[in-house]
Amino acid sequence: MSEHDLAGRWRRIIRGDGKSWVAFAHGTCVVLPEPGPDADLAAEAVEILREYGPVHAGSPAGDFGTITLDPGPGWVVYGHHNDVLTYVGPDEVQDTSGVAVGLLGRGKRDTDGRELQVVHVEDKRPR
């Protein structure tokens, strides 16, 4: 998925027009509901994802849940931080069970949490 397509997907998924967010290369999004007026959104998101992105087996970082998007297509995978979400598209999985989708999304979050490559910043702070 291109950076443009990923940003558009997150615009449709995130509820609440006033939420700023940052998207990462493998589909993870960090929502920043109330950033300060002078905050560097990308830097804040990187710090959150650095801590809450990598998977550590046997810890809360290995836990996940899935949300089927309605309307779709795809799923959002969430973990141990409420504002860290990962998009999984229907073209990425053959097995659409919650476990299969969740494992893929968790893996994508892990990769984003290690690479920390920001691809889009959506700044919704009041001007």
Image (cartoon, rainbow, N blue to C red):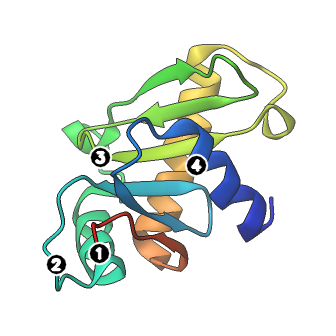
Identify the residue position indicated by label 2 in the image: 37
Q: Earlier in the sequence, mark 2 or mark 4?
A: 4
Quote the CA–CA distance across marks 1 and 4: 22 Å
The amino acid type, in three-letter code, at marker 4 is Trp
Quote the CA–CA distance across marks 3 and 2: 19 Å
Secondary structure type for disc 2: loop
Q: Which mark is residue 83?
A: 3
The amino acid type, in three-letter code, at marker 3 is Asp
At horizontal 43% and vertical 35% (from top left) the residue drawn is: 15
Quote the CA–CA distance across marks 4 and 3: 13 Å
Q: Tell me where residue 72 appears, x and y as whole percent.
A: 72, 24
The amino acid type, in three-letter code, at marker 1 is Arg
21 relative to 14, above or below: below
Mark 2, other Cα within 10 Å: few <14 / some 14–19 / many ≥20: few
In the visual, does 60 lie left or right of 113?
A: left
Q: Earlier in the sequence, mark 1 or mark 4?
A: 4
Q: Tell me where residue 66 appears, x and y as whole percent.
A: 49, 23
Quote the CA–CA distance across marks 2 and 4: 22 Å
In the visual, does 31 lie left or right of 11?
A: left
Q: Nearer the viewer, residue 35 or 53?
A: 35
Identify the residue position indicated by label 4 in the image: 10
Quote the CA–CA distance across marks 3 and 1: 23 Å
Asked whether the beta carbons under mark 2 and mark 1 sit within 8 Å of each other, the answer is no
**Viewer-nearest of discs 3 and 1:** 1
Q: Which mark is residue 127?
A: 1
**Viewer-nearest of discs 2 and 4:** 2
